[in-house]
Image (cartoon, grey):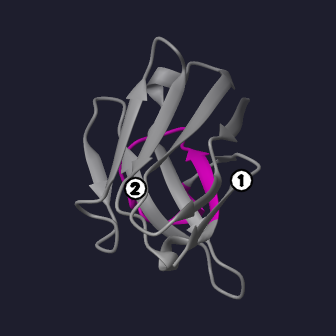
Amino acid sequence: QVQLVESGGGLVQAGDSLRLSCAASGRAFNWYPMGWFRQAPGKEREFVAAITWSGTTYYADSVKGRFTISRDNTRNTVYLQMNSLKPEDTAEYYCAGRSSGGGDYTSPNDYNYWGQGAQVTVSS
């Protein structure tokens, strides 16, 4: 079993930066592809970014060039650096982990483990 705990959310202004962290405990974290998803009120959960065990990254078009996902396997932690934040980035952000590679990294259905969420609010 894997436990995921997000931190680093908050209230910022448009154009600011924020870094989310996701600390993993339990089974061998460095084997797992990891992802970030977000969900705004009244909307479905959507893919933000993903990173494989080897460091290959994937991004949603809406965040490409502004957000960067990374991982530190020595600290069992995955990060989401968010720059040039926009009001439409406001959402609850969730860290997620998979127990296998391949398939669709953008689908929340392919992730086995989820954190509790971190709220990010961007004011205009």
Q: Amino acid at mark 1?
A: Gly
Q: How many marks?
A: 2
Compared with 29, 8 (above or below) is below
Q: Quadrant of the N terminus?
A: top right
Q: Amino acid at mark 2?
A: Ala
Residue 64 in the image: above or below residue 46:
above
Residue density around tag 1, few if under 14, some if 14–19, many if 20 or more, within 10 Å:
many
* Residue at the image point whose x is 35% and y is 38% from the top: 52
The residue sitting at 45% across, 25% down in the picture is: 31
* Res 26 label: none
Camera-side residue of 2 and 21: 21
Q: Position of residue 17 (x, y in %)?
A: 43, 52
Element type where label 2 sits in the image: strand
What span is in magenta?
92-110
Q: Which disc is residue 49 wearing?
A: 2
Q: Which residue is mark 1?
A: 117
- At x 62% / y 42%, what residue is drawn? 8
Q: What's the residue at 26%, 63% (across, down)?
A: 64
- Picture coordinates of residue 41, whole percent (x, y): 71, 82
Circle 2 packing at 10 Å, graded few (<14), some (14-19), many (20+), is many
Closer-to-camera residue (22/30): 22
